[in-house]
Amino acid sequence: MRIFIAGLATETNTFSPIPTGWSGFKEQRVWFRNDGSRQPPVAGNVPLITWRRLAEADGHEVVESLCTFAQPAGTTLRHVYEGLRDMLLDDLRRAGPIDVVLLFMHGAMVAHGYDDCEGDTLAHVREVVGPQAKIGIELDLHCHLTELMRRSADAIITYKEYPHIDMAERAAELYALCTRAARGEVTPVTAYHDCRMISMWRTPQEPMRSFVERMQLLEGKDGILSISFGHGFPWGDVEEVGAKMVVIADGDRLKAEALAKRLGDEIWAMREATSTRHDTIDEGIDRSLSGQGGPVVLADVADNAGGGAPSDNTAILARLVDRGVKDAVIGCFWDPQAVAFCVEAGEGATFPLRIGGKCGPSSGDPVDLMVTVRRLDPDFTQTGLSGGRASFGPSAWVSADGIDIVLVSRRQQTFAPDAFTGLGISLADKALVVVKSTQHFHAAFAPVAREIRYVAAPGAIPPDYANIPFSKRTRPYWPRVTDPFAPTNALQEPAA
């Protein structure tokens, strides 16, 4: 077989103040041209590495196009998306006859003029390869699943885990399904079920842990080829925002639809049990000061770069300073100017520094501190998702009044303890560790944390799902309404 592989991804927060342009794809995070699968693993190329390894082991020919993954931010500029899409399509046309197309995209990419970049790309790919070639796409589970995507692809598979520790496993699943389909062994048909919900589901915790395990036990039995739960990305103002079940059956659409509804009903029944409690800033701080045996990790969920936030909100830092909290560490702040000042001052220097609060209203006010520069790194990295590395660029560790602060030049959420320890900061003696992340930190920080808490501080992705100001979703959803399945023609007022 001849297998075409490519990656084109970003997660779009349509409420973010940060535009996504060419530099977001080519300079800031991941950019490979025709050889991404041969590079060390990073967030954007893990599926391509898997596909090449499996295909070459099976004796297939691999044709590779671009591989890029921009840091989540605001809406992508139209000419940038079209340029990237057309680059991929040009490579596909030049490739000649193709048996299988495997794409890695996010599922929540929005560009000016394109609310469904993934569906648009898939539709264009289908026009090029024709009806006989098999097209599969791997998506982040924080995706907007559309009818155009379902109609254009033979197989849609999302991650099952949040944090996303299973990129390679899902890539292998997609490869197997699409190559089996190309050999005529199976006939995949895909069904959706709209759960009428907008929320976040953390898979390490019950009852979601058991639900994911049940999904996997159903795969490969009674004609069911694959099951995905698309959680949706709440901060995308598009018509299809929200959670959906995806079931792929072997030639039996009714069976796929029935199982998708059954599993969707299970998610609905767990809606209260799976909702995350969010502390106030002071509640989180109080919790960290009330015990011993390792640090409490507080997740600053609303200022997560991985959701398109600037990662320079200062609300928690300001409160730590106001309360005189010691033995705390917080990061990672996206503040290239502050990093530049630290580089200018040099390691060991003590001087007044203005931190954060630079990108807009969601960033809060800057915090002015007398800091000491403890460590500088011209190209600092941390452990990323699925075994890759994630770059912070030039970075600085500064301390002020018992608080250690990590400042970075490249916007990136905090994934792992080495975002701190890599600069020399010890976590063992800390009472409190604040991470700018929503959930991807969990896998790496859980082993070192006495407790993990989620804090609803101000920011660009506040976890107030009932009051996100959507203008394009017209179907009701929970928690904005208590019964979104009741007959209605428009969104109701938020439930009390």
Image (tube, rainbow, N blue to C red):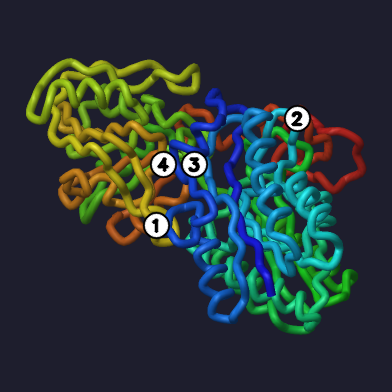
Query: In this figure, which residue is indicated by the disc labeled 2?
Result: 113
Q: Are marks 4 and 3 in contact (CB under 8 Å)?
A: yes
SS at circle 3? helix
First of labels 2, 4 by sequence position? 2
Residue 306, numbered label: 3
Nearest to the observer: residue 489 or residue 116: 116
Classify mark 1: residues with Cα within 10 Å, few (<14), some (14-19) or many (20+): some
Marks 3/2: CA–CA distance: 23 Å
Marks 2/4: CA–CA distance: 28 Å
**Side of 449 relative to 27 (left or right):** left
What's the residue type where badge 1 is placed?
A: Gly
Which mark's residue is nearer the viewer, 1 or 4? 1
Classify mark 4: residues with Cα within 10 Å, few (<14), some (14-19) or many (20+): many
Residue 341 position within the rendered picture, expressed as x and y whole percent measured from the top left: 22, 20
Marks 4/3: CA–CA distance: 6 Å
Residue 354 position within the rendered picture, expressed as x and y whole percent measured from the top left: 27, 17
Which mark's residue is nearer the viewer, 3 or 2? 2
Quarter-of-image position of residue 489? top right
What's the residue type where badge 4 is placed?
A: Gln
Query: In this figure, which residue is indicated by the disc labeled 1?
Result: 388
**Side of 72 relative to 489 (left or right):** left
Residue for point 17% across, 27% down: 400
Residue for point 59% across, 48% down: 200
Residue 413, numbered label: 4
In the depicted structure, whether residue 145 falls above or below residue 254: above
